[in-house]
Amino acid sequence: MPQIKNYILIIYMLFSINTFAQKAIAEDPELLQNNINYRIEQSQTELENYNYFKAKKNLNEALSLAQNAGNKKSIGVIYAIKGRLELILEEEDKAIKSLNKAIEIQRIINDNVNLGSSYKSFGDVYLAKKDYYSALDSYTAAKSKFQEEDLNEELAETLLREGQTYIELKNYKKARDIIEQSLAMAKKYDFYKIQSEALINHAKVYNKLRNDEKALEVALEGIQIARKNKFTNISNEGYLIISELYKNLENHKLSRDYLESHLQLSDSIRSLTRINSSRNEETQFRLNEEIEKNKEVVQKLEKAEDDKNLGTLISILSVALITILSLLTLSLYKNNNIRLKTNNMLHKKNGELIIAKEKAELASKTKANFLSTVTHELRTPLYAVTGLSNMLLDENPRPEQVQHLKSLKFSGDYLLTFINDILQINKIEANKVDIEPESFSLKKKINNIILALNNSAIDNNIKIHFEYDKDLPENFIADQLKISQILINLIGNSIKFTKDGDIWIRVYKIEEQGKIFTLRFEVEDNGIGISQEKQDHMFESFSQGSIQINRKYGGTGLGLSIVKGLIDILKGKIYVKSELEKGTTFYFEIPLEHTNIKEAEENKSNYFDGNKSDLDLSKVKILVVEDNKINQMITKKILTKMDLKCDIVDNGEDAVQRIKDNDYNIILMDIHMPGISGMEATKRVRAFDKELTIFALTAVTIEDKMHEFEEAGFTDIIPKPFKQEEFEKKLYNALASKNKISKASS
């Protein structure tokens, strides 16, 4: 008896030790993590060996352990692997759910390495679903993460998948460029599997681009690497492609040989792949469970029937009813949980969208501020370039210097045009362009444009023909300035690319609804024409026919982009048809409102149209407020040439004091200066002198700052760099106006 007690005591101690050990393992974080990692590694091994059901089982066990331990990183990794497994099993919708869970966790914990892999898997799923553009978005997100973490192999593989997506989209040139990037990276770091697969895909692309010799060359190189490293699937795909290429090249013997190799290897791969057996295994497992449950129910029913026991039968039916109700309750509970999770996800996505919107708005403002700063910094030295070149041309330079000075002036004018074009595109993209409708004569406006451009046409020996529909009214309400810009750009383009030819400008009605006329404008030439390939990118910024055309004909490549933006603002559409060496036709359609009101009389030009000798310039005093020494010198030189005297100060505080102490006729005020700005200085002057003529002599972007200039109290604006004759006329006009007022008062 005591001996039995000792046995019981020993068994109890062993049981206690075992229980304690299990508890210690469960509570030890390191041991728990090792347990999770072991199951993840096992699942990866089962995946590689095509044992998908066993892989899924290991992942479920690992997930349960990771969730109990609250290990978010492991949970994210497990969901990502589940997503890849479900993709292999062709369960794309399940894969999307698993990958969404993985990405949600990995974003929160900033697990960029695994987040990149999840994005790539997402791309693979979308590629399988033939949602190619969503796949490209996912691959782009993956590349960003891999680049941040310097994961070259993952980046190379993602580039390869991106290239495969472009193959599916039949964009073979884009596919070639991206696969080339993947191949270069694979060669650099000896990623042989990616290298061989990239070469095989390159062969597909070159085949589609009808370069079978190059396709065969890269395919043979790829198959050689795949054979050497025993990449079975890649070899199999390569055999098929090479067979097709030899067939195209009419080498039927080699084509048959490679096709046989492909078929043999396909049979071998099929025998190894166990997707169907894995599914059968899982199905059988679930079927056995259901059979056991059914057996129990059948036994109970048989017993009830044998015993003629109605109570037992009612009990069974009651249990069945309770089970059904329980299942319904559980289903409702799950649905409610799904709805709650969906709502939470929607709230989260909404928050992310708001953040993304704020970031986009900030980026847009930053871009606008950057462009404003850059253009100001460029306009300031441009003022010196154009001003000095004009002055030197007026000072009787040596004959051999004239051409150099004219070239310098031309370069300055070209750069100014380029800056203005960039600013206009920026405004169009930022939706800062306002429509300013007014009544005008369309026919007269187009005639004026043709007159303005006719000298350039004559230089190229071009005749311009204008056809205005005789049944079309002349007066419309629209933004005539934007219509002028569009036509000047298109006609100017035709003049530039036509030599010894003709240009036809046509305007006619294509639709009429009440007062709204939809008009078609055509600008046709018989110039050099545009290839079909270039027409596809015609309206993109910095797009021109070729580098040679750019060098020969000049231009910034921004004109047509501006035209497209302006036509979009006017709610119109633009089209182009062209043939090389035969000519080009641009035609656009815009809605215009017909009016019986004749064109409003044009405001008189700001230019001086009186007699300079009527002005007593000896008594005129001008103050130049400018901090840049070169600009001071140029402005003073221009004023001296105009027989005008000036004082110069280099900051706003001194300018305000000088104006208080002296009787000036005109102030030329710079905006950006040390101390107080020209805006603030003008506001202070307006506090004690409302009538003084103050010009903003500035390089800032006028359109964006116009309301600020008006609020500050400027009389007018002279943008730098300016044309000297326009500057002179504006000043003389202001002096003549003051002279008339003083005579009238006396």
Image (tube, rainbow, N blue to C red):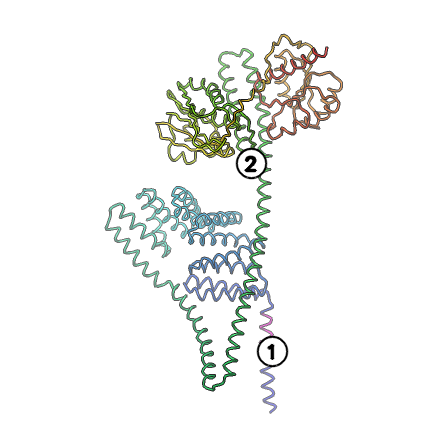
Which mark identifies residue 434?
A: none
Give the number of the mark in front: 2 or 1: 2
Counting other residues with Cα less than 10 Å from the Cα at mark 2, is it few (<14), some (14-19), or many (20 or more)?
Answer: some
- Residue at 52% in and 53% down: 115
Of residue 675 and residue 480, the one placed in the foreground of this image is: 480
Extreme-bottom residue of the structure: 1
Q: Mark 1 points at which residue?
A: 16
Q: Position of residue 462 (x, y in %)?
A: 40, 19
* Lower sequence index among marks 2 and 1: 1
Q: In this view, does 395 lie above or below 356?
A: above
Q: Where is residue 539 in the image (x, y as percent from the top left)?
A: 45, 33
SS of the residue under disc 1: helix
Left or right of residue 717: residue 453 = left
Q: Image quarter for residue 30?
A: bottom right
Q: Image quarter for residue 694?
A: top right
Q: Name the residue under label 2.
A: 430
Instruction: Tell me the kind of residue under disc 1.
Output: Ser
Q: Where is residue 527 in the image (x, y as percent from the top left)?
A: 38, 25
- Rounded to the nearest angstrom, the CA distance separating label 2 from label 1 is 74 Å
